Image: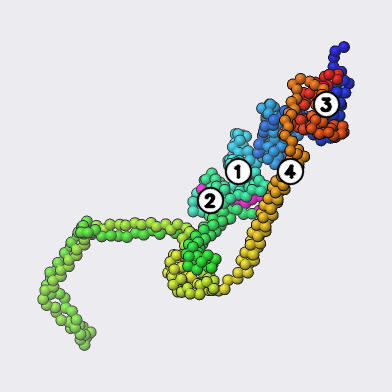
Amino acid sequence: MNGFDPKALLGRFNRLFGGFTPGQRVVTAVAALAVVVGGVMFVSWVSKPSYAPVFTGLSSADAAAITAKLTDSGEPYQLADGGQTVMVPQADVYQTRITLSGEGLPAGDSNSQGYSLLDKQSMTSSDFQQKVTYQRALEGELSKTIESIEGVQAAVVHLAVPQDDVFTTDAAKPTGSVLVKTAPGTNLSSTMVDSIVHLVAGSVAKLDPAQVTVADASGKVLNAAGENGGGSAGADARQSQQIAVSDATAAAVQSMLDKVVGPGKAVVRVDAQLNFDQQTIDRQEYVPTKPNTTLTQTKSKETYNGAGGAPVGGVLGPDNVGTGTTGSGKNNYVKEDSTQTNAVGTLKEQTTTAPGKIQRLSVAVLLDAKSAGSVDQTQLSSLVSAAAGLDPKRGDVVQVSQMAFDTTAAATAKKELDAAAADKKRADMISLGKTVGLGVLILLALVIGLLRSRRRGGPAAPQEIEVYRVPTGPAPVDALLEQAESRSAAPHRESVGELRAQSRETIGTLARERPDDVARLLRGWIADGS
């Protein structure tokens, strides 16, 4: 009866496996285990569905509500981005999104709904309610905008917008404050803080960027109101600019001193003080035209002619009556006025000083006394002043001194480097010696083997080497054993046990060198035995 016989198949496998050497058994077992594990992992990977995000950027409350709904419905899900992203199998993304949206998820933050709050107003809303609702909507829209910045998880915006006043001089100015929560391990750069400040200021009428405060969730003030970028963002920018100016000046002086006293023989330190005040100067000058151009000219003349006048002067008499004198002659009066207006040109000039101007530079140069003994300090000070661009009118100072440098650390480091180099050289030599020694041993083994083979062969003529050829069809193993025994017994007369051991070794060599032929031979042998 022809059919599948598990016992016969198991028996054949046991006979085949029993004929293996211990090393072949271990290799076969490891290969079988690897195939089983790889198959299980492949099946698991193929059967595992691919997940796609259904909602991203969720708050903790929305994520909790969505995962609760998915758990109740039995839908598998995964969380990513620290719980802000919920993923479901890719085939169920759209249906899950529609189902959750129908249930009002994600609900979002009720305080940052944005302009959707305006849709909930009724006709009976008062003017105050409308203004408050509009302000809440504006705050919500700004929060959403700030949250879209990379690295910002959540943002809360508060605006203080005063009511319009008839007297504009007494009107209060609007202010704003922003609280941001960043992702773990993320810090907002000064550029990002400035962008938040200008986004808020540009969205509210009459809001000055200097009136916007930005803080993070840890309570650190990133931008303080009233300082116009005087928070950490502005301070970082000013400090970076001062450091850049100091480093550039020090590098210019250091490169020059390295050529004079040698590398490592001079230390340069520069302290730059910058003026970050922005000044605007308006200048107006009247310039006369050349030649003079008369615009208007007015002349007037007044003349008076008259006879002698009334008595003038005199003394009192006994009856208190004056005894004056009578004037005589004629009176003439002439007055002339002339007014001329010439054309005059006007020159207006407005100068704005950009912040960051160098206010003062202080340069300190320290030379190694051992290397700079012959250097003229006066001449060197002049060179340093010219290289650093010092201006005495600005109050810049330069100080050049000589002191003995402490070279203990440098000497210790040099010794350590030399020791490390010597160790590396020694290790390379040892490695090279090992390689050369191994090569010598291999060469010596080859020479000894060649000498032994010649001594064993003697002066006899060289014999023809017989090459084993594994037949293409099945053949019993006994034939191979007999062939090996006959071959080994021809040139050497040895015992039967040694011949069989040598035959087994020959068969093992054939199995390693030509595994396919040996496998085909074994299959034929198994087929004949069954």
* Residue under label 2: 209
> Amino acid under label 1?
Glu
Label 1, label 2: how far apart the Cα atoms are? 22 Å
Residue 196 in magenta?
no
Where in the figure is residue 473, as x and y percent of width and height?
Answer: 76, 20
Depth check: give the residue in front, 232 or 76. Answer: 76
Q: For numbered disc 2, what is the local secondary structure? A: helix
Q: For numbered disc 4, what is the local secondary structure? A: helix
Observer-side mark, 1 or 4, equals 4
Q: Which label's residue is closer to the chain start, 2 or 4?
A: 2
Q: Which label's residue is closer to the chain start, 1 or 4?
A: 1
> Amino acid under label 3?
Glu
Residue 339 picture quarter: bottom left
Label 2, label 4: how far apart the Cα atoms are? 97 Å
Left or right: residue 476 versus residue 165 is: right
> Amino acid under label 2?
Pro
Label 1 close to label 2 by CB (< 8 Å): no
Label 3, label 2: how far apart the Cα atoms are? 102 Å
* Residue under label 4: 451
Question: Can you tell which mark lies on residue 150?
Answer: 1
Left or right: residue 60 versus residue 192 is: right
Observer-side mark, 3 or 2, equals 3
